[in-house]
Image (tube, helix red, strand yellow):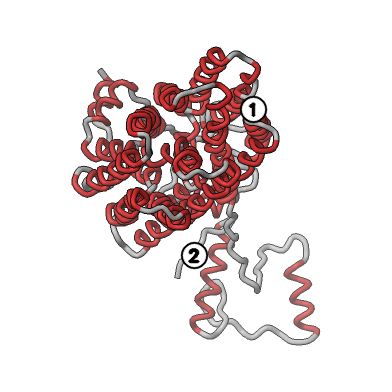
Amino acid sequence: MTYHYAANKETRVEHIDQARRSSSGAPSTASGQPASRPPAGPAAAAVATATSAPGAAHQTSTTPQRDERRTRVRWMILFILFVVTTINYADRASLSIAGNAMQKALGMSPVAMGYVFSAFAWAYVIAQLPGGRLLDRFGTKRVYAVSLAAWSLFTLAQGLVAGLTAAVAVASLFALRFVMGFAEAPAFPGNSRMTSTWFPRAERGTAAAIFNASQYFAAVLFTPIMGWIVHTFGWPYVFVFMGVLGILMTGVWLKTVYAPKDHPRVNQAELQYIEAGGALVDLETRETDGAASQTPQPVKVPMGASIREMLSNRMLLGIFIAQYCINALTYFFLTWFPIYLVQERHMSILKAGFIASIPAVCGFLGGVLGGVISDALLKRGFSASVARKTPIVFGMLLSTCMIACNYVDSEFLIVAIMATAFFGKGIGALGWAVVSDTAPVEAGGVCASLFNACGNVAGITTPIIIGYLVQGSGSFNSALVFVGANAVVATLCYLFVVGDIKRMVLTRSLVARGA
């Protein structure tokens, strides 16, 4: 039998004493001797009055105090992360929905469109390490709020380029997508820090899968909406709509997100549960009055030394390369997929918007299922390596089926194949759960940023490479082979490079700190 500590020692003794009386079948006194049966009738009333009177030397309850029920605030935090990340991905994808109409209005070639698509990722990658450093220095809540407000303003501004000349409009779009990438850089490392802070290890896979599945939910919810806006009002209004939505969400973030020990609605039972399960509850702690926390914080290490040590670690290097390959699939769906449906499969933008949401639904379901499967394997006693790698390998192999679209013409089959590929990609997108399990405590934000930077190099290369492949061949056939090959490389990394999945411990960086 497991006992939870009560509010004071006397209550805890009472719980144990009552458990002993229950097991012996007879009541007993505090001294362990059998107690006489309580008097009945008037005598019982007298005893009750005496024991409840003010000034009684000792009070003994005849009903055991119930253990405190755990709150579930961590799931509310995850919901907010999911909503914000959905807006994040919808903002990124807004250009792909407006892209076909924009190409015609501004006279852009596929290669020029590829460069504009990649502008976001150039800045996003460059800003990852500074963003991680800001998260480690100032905490997730404040940095994320500034990030959300800034990227929403830059998204809104993209709708204002329609009145410019074609050349100036293209240059302005590139610049705005570039600064938007800077602004969004802390978002996913912030998500990783929040899940490491709020979730025990056995729930972390599900939590990471849910916030990561927001990329698919963004396509499910916003692709049809943005397609309708383009069809009805014109492409500039997509950016205005998404920008205003993000600005409003900034206020919600500031009102609802806190560190575990600072949250006004969390109780001690939930704090004890998540901390016992491996949650880093002190990572984000700040006193509510703004003073520095008295809780011991992780040792701070030089950023350069920690980066060099992490890049020399075979496990982390394999994880980083695999994330690049997984993100190649992500950026195909975020950038070129709606244009593929319009230009290669001759759908209207309105129809493409709705059709693109079908694979996204499957990706969302696969994303959540991958995390659930991974955590279920952990709870059944499998190692972290088996629990994390199994969904990743299966999902990446399944996603290679997209190449089969080169050999069919039926719209139904194309949608079915892409839905299957997106489902597999969702199952395999567990990189953030892996980095939450492996990032060194002393440099968690920097490690998450380095992981995200490596992964999002694919946001630079994939749109440009696909642009050249499409312009050179006149079709998307070679582009689909290229994207499928990335899934194969990700599988090989997890099978043969990563090895055991465990938390990395910095050694040389700590020596460099003391030097």
Q: Position of residue 365 (x, y in %)?
A: 48, 56
Q: Position of residue 126 (x, y in %)?
A: 40, 21
Q: Is residue 276 visible?
A: no
Residue depth check, mark 1 versus mark 2: number of the one nearer the observer: 1
Of residue 112 and residue 68, the one placed in the foreground of this image is 112
Amino acid marked by disc 1 = Pro
Of residue 148 and residue 302, the one placed in the foreground of this image is 148
Q: Quadrant of residue 372?
A: bottom left
Amino acid marked by disc 2 = Tyr
Distance CA(mark 1)–CA(mark 2): 61 Å
- In the image, taking residue 271 as reference, residue 448 lies left or right, namely left
Q: Secondary structure at mark 1?
A: helix
Of residue 467 and residue 302, the one placed in the foreground of this image is 467
> Which disc number belongs to residue 149?
none
According to the picture, the residue beneath numbered tag 2 turns out to be 3
- Report crowding for label 2: few under 14, some 14 to 19, many 20 or more residues within 10 A (C-alpha): few
Mark 1 or mark 2: whose residue is earlier in sequence: 2
The residue located at (55%, 71%) in the rendering is 30
Q: Examine the rendered structure and indicate whether residue 335 appears above or below residue 133.
A: below
According to the picture, the residue beneath numbered tag 1 turns out to be 236
Q: Examine the rendered structure and indicate whether residue 48 appears above or below residue 335.
A: below
The reply to whether the C-beta atoms of the residues labelled 1 and 2 are less than 8 Å apart is no
